[in-house]
Amino acid sequence: MVKLTMMTVGMQKRIALVLFLLIALSYQAFSQIAPNKYFIQFTDKNNSSYSLDHPEAFLTARALTRRQAHGIAVEENDIPVNSTYVQEVIKYGAHVLTRSRWMNGVTIFSNDTAAIDSIENLPFVKRTISFKEGVHKQKVFFKNETSHKRPPTHYKTTSVTEKEYGAALTQIKQIDGIPLQQKGFRGQGMVIAILDAGYTDVPTQALFDSLRDEGRLLGTKNFVLPGGSVYVHYHGRMVLSCMAADIPGEMIGTAPKASYWLLVSEDASSENVIEEYNWVSAAEFADSVGADIINSSLGYIDFDDSTYSHPYSDMDGKTNVSTLGAEIAASKGILVVNSAGNNGQSVTFPWIGAPADGDSVFTIGAVDSSGMRAVFSSVGPTYDGRIKPTVMAMGQDATVANADSGVVFANGTSFSSPIMAGMSACLWQAHPQASNMQIIQALKETASYHSDPNNQMGWGIPDFAKADSLLALGLGIRPFSKRTLLQIYPNPFRSAFQIRLQGIRGDLNIQLYDLSGRMVYQKVYNKGSFSTSLRIKGLNWLNPGIYMLKAIDAQHVFYGKIVKE
């Protein structure tokens, strides 16, 4: 009986594999006729069967809750594309690959150029874009991403707690993430969507046992080959392990108790502009199912057909399709975390790619175990002069899951990004009242280069324990009231600063806290001792750094940040 069951399971797997290969071969045959894939953009969403009055018809309860929690309205770009328009396109023999509500269009397959001409002339079609294939090259974003089994130099474990992290200790200790996890924040209740090229071995890899057994693998979806498996490439498995691995003593990821969606938006066999549209469709899906965080260890610069390649001038945060999609995702309250790229040694294009150039994108560069920038890590600025990357995490000799049950050590900003994304999920879990932008701001302000950011290291390596303290004290969540505390100056200060006041009720209790949450200064000022401004002096003894100012009157508590030089 047991042998029969095993044979039956094996036969089922073989049948499924054959069916998948047939679909894949058909798809490859299609892709050999170029151009045969197009983006069809519609003019409007008129007469849609969906409406803003009933968003539950196209957004899950979790997606709506995220919007409500941060005061984000459901907008027209949330409404799906008009299904009547889509059906009209299908009538011309087109096969719809993906739909994009944010870009208001569909990607299609068709080898009938006459049909495409007819579709282009439909009154509700704004434009068509063809995706031509070129000679396949090595994917730019996977360049320089190597792995090896030679153990790099790690922090030496100093406690039983540190031994729990196994080979991944360095990458979490470097960003001071252990204190947050030891408080119990390991990503519980947070949803992370990964956009990547595939996730081979995830169904069997021991490092993901708890992810599978606890039902936290929420689902999969393939946007490159709709209906196809997502277990088709190794890259996403390595990325996922940086967050979700959970075997004490071997490897603990930065969000081992979060829930995950595994999405394939990247075609590992080619580099085509359609992948940027796939990226947007996948991000939309992540939004619709209520993801809190998107990790994208992907980037777009050069394409197989060089006529589509992005010049540096495109890296302005408002040109590339994937960047536009990332910015919209961020506007929906999602924390979009993206690798900076591995072009740092390029003579012609050392800069970050898309969508990492987005202003609201949390762009992550790579450092080694000592905190030095990895030479391959792409640099800024963006074309319009903004500092990038945002922050750094370990991407040289990072610990990732191997194809078998063990781990290897890999190089690439593809791994610094999920290390940061997973730890950000823990921080956000601890401070759910914060917005995605406030999470980024807290991490920037506690990073090693916060006082002097640059285009090689951004704001530097964040300190999650300090960011936890800042958010606990209200930084970025409850700013100074413009009605009551109008101005602090100078800021930064050396030994004294002033607060310009209006409408204070009663005495004012001034308190200063350091990043550990310890109160370092307190004094109560009688209401009769000041009128419209209050001078706080004699603080030359304070160590340089960031402090939280807390001002308490008879009715209110106000918070703000101040920096001691």
Image (spheres, rainbow, N blue to C red):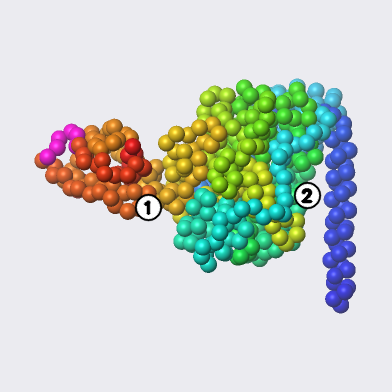
Q: Is residue 44 left or right of residue 450?
A: right
> Relative to 351, does residue 168 appear above or below in the rendering?
below
Q: Is residue 528 magenta?
A: no
Image-quadrant location for residue 121: top right
Q: Nearer the viewer, mark 1 or mark 2?
A: 1
Q: Which mark is residue 232?
A: 2
Q: Is residue 374 left or right of residue 563?
A: right
Residue 88 in sight here = no
Residue segment shown in magenta: 529-534
Gap in angstroms between the C-alphas marked 1 and 2: 45 Å
* Residue 5 position within the rendered picture, expressed as x and y whole percent measured from the top left: 85, 72
* Residue 192 position within the rendered picture, expressed as x and y whole percent measured from the top left: 59, 50
Q: To which residue does mark 1 refer?
A: 516
* Residue 110 position within the rendered picture, expressed as x and y whole percent measured from the top left: 83, 32
> Relative to 294, does residue 454 appear above or below in the rendering?
above
Q: From the image, which quarter does the C terminus lie in?
A: top left
Q: From the image, which quarter does the N terminus lie in?
A: bottom right
Say which residue appears at 85% left-offset and 56% top-offset.
16
Q: How many marks?
A: 2
Residue that extends furthest to the bottom in the rendered view of this protein: 1
Label 1–label 2 contact, CB within 8 A: no
Question: Nearest the camera: 71 or 470?
Answer: 470
* Residue 35 position within the rendered picture, expressed as x and y whole percent measured from the top left: 82, 28
Residue that extends furthest to the left in the rendered view of this protein: 528
* Residue kind at label 1, given as amino acid type: Ser
Q: Is residue 233 left or right of residue 66?
A: right
> Which is nearer the N-term, disc 1 or disc 2?
2
Local SS, label 1: loop
